[in-house]
Every structure is written in structure tokens, then in C-alpha cells.
Image: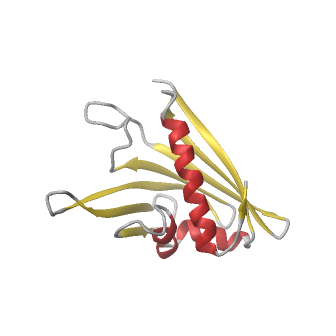
Amino acid sequence: MSLTSYTIDRTYAVPPERLFQAFTDPTDLAAWVWGADAPGVTAEVDLRVGGLVEMAMRMPDPEGGESIAGFRGMYVAIEEPHRLVHTVHWDASVGYNAPGMHPIDEVLIAEIAPYENGCRLQYTHLGIPDDGLSAPEHERSVRATLDVLALHLGVPSAG
């Protein structure tokens, strides 16, 4: 299986420390990762190399119960406030991880640098199956999510 990646560049009118916090504080993560209106979002963070990052969203299902979708990963690099790297193991259907398929864990890299009156984010998502559909859909979704992050931070973003 061939793998691909994408990178998104954005600027935010906040200090690098604030953007780094938005990627590492459980309250911040729960507020923006799946959008401001996502139901029952929780986040857990053990911010150390080898520590866990976990996001879950609880949604009612048609039979009156609830389903849980999310991801979990392990921090591989932490260089506060400039670089954060963690794996992603989906606990939700993203198409290419259906039963019988053999997906690998993905990797997210957030690189944050001072830029003009704020900071620049370079967000890279590695390890997506190169099927022509998955990476563009992930990128579209993450671009929308990074718009929600800007709203959460109360600032415009560019990129």
C-alpha cells in the first residue's frame, strides 16, 4: 500500500505559546478539534514523550444508545512551544480502516514559529493511504477544523 501526506500552512494572531497550548490542553482540544457544536467531546493529554493523547466524541445512535468515535495516539516529540508530534490510531471509521483492512497508525506534526504579529502553523499529516480520496478528504476536514481553532482563539487565520 502506498502512503501519502499533506501539509497546511496557517497564520494565527496569537503568540506561539498560546497556539501550542491549544494543541496540548484538554479543554482547548475539546473545544475545537471536532468543531464547536460537536457532541460530548472529551480529551485526555499526558504531555510527555511516550504519553497519551486521546480524543472522543459521544453521539446518540438510532437505537437510543450512544456511539463513541475518536482517536488516540502517543507523543513522539515535544519541543514547547514550537513542535509537537504524535501518532494517530483511529477509533472511528475513516473508510480505509474498515474491518479486514490493515491501516497503519498515522502521524501528525504541528510546527509553530513566530510570524509577524503572531505565529505560523505548519500542520503535516503523514501515513494516509494514497487512494486518491482519503488525503484530500482529510485535508478538507482539517482545514475546516483549523478555521474552528481560529474562532476558538478569537482571531482570524490566514492560509
Furthest toward the left, the residue is 63
User: Which image quadrant: the N terminus?
Assistant: top left
Percent position (x, y) of residue 123? 63, 51
* Residue name at image x 58 percent, y 70 percent: 22
Q: Nearer the viewer, residue 155 or 43?
A: 155
Residue 140 horizontal side relative to residue 102, left or right: right
| 97 shown above or below 17 | above
Furthest toward the front, the residue is 62
Q: Quadrant of residue 56?
A: bottom left
Percent position (x, y) of residue 135? 53, 37
Q: Quadrant of residue 19?
A: bottom right
* Residue name at image x 37 percent, y 48 percent: 90
Residue 107 horizontal side relative to residue 114, left or right: left
* Residue name at image x 69 percent, y 62 percent: 82
* Residue name at image x 44 percent, y 61 percent: 53
Percent position (x, y) of residue 147? 61, 61
Furthest toward the right, the residue is 116
Total number of numbered discs in the rendering: 0
Percent position (x, y) of residue 16? 72, 69
Q: Nearer the viewer, residue 23 or 37?
A: 37
> Tell me, what colour scheme is on the image?
secondary structure
| 99 shown above or below 30 | above
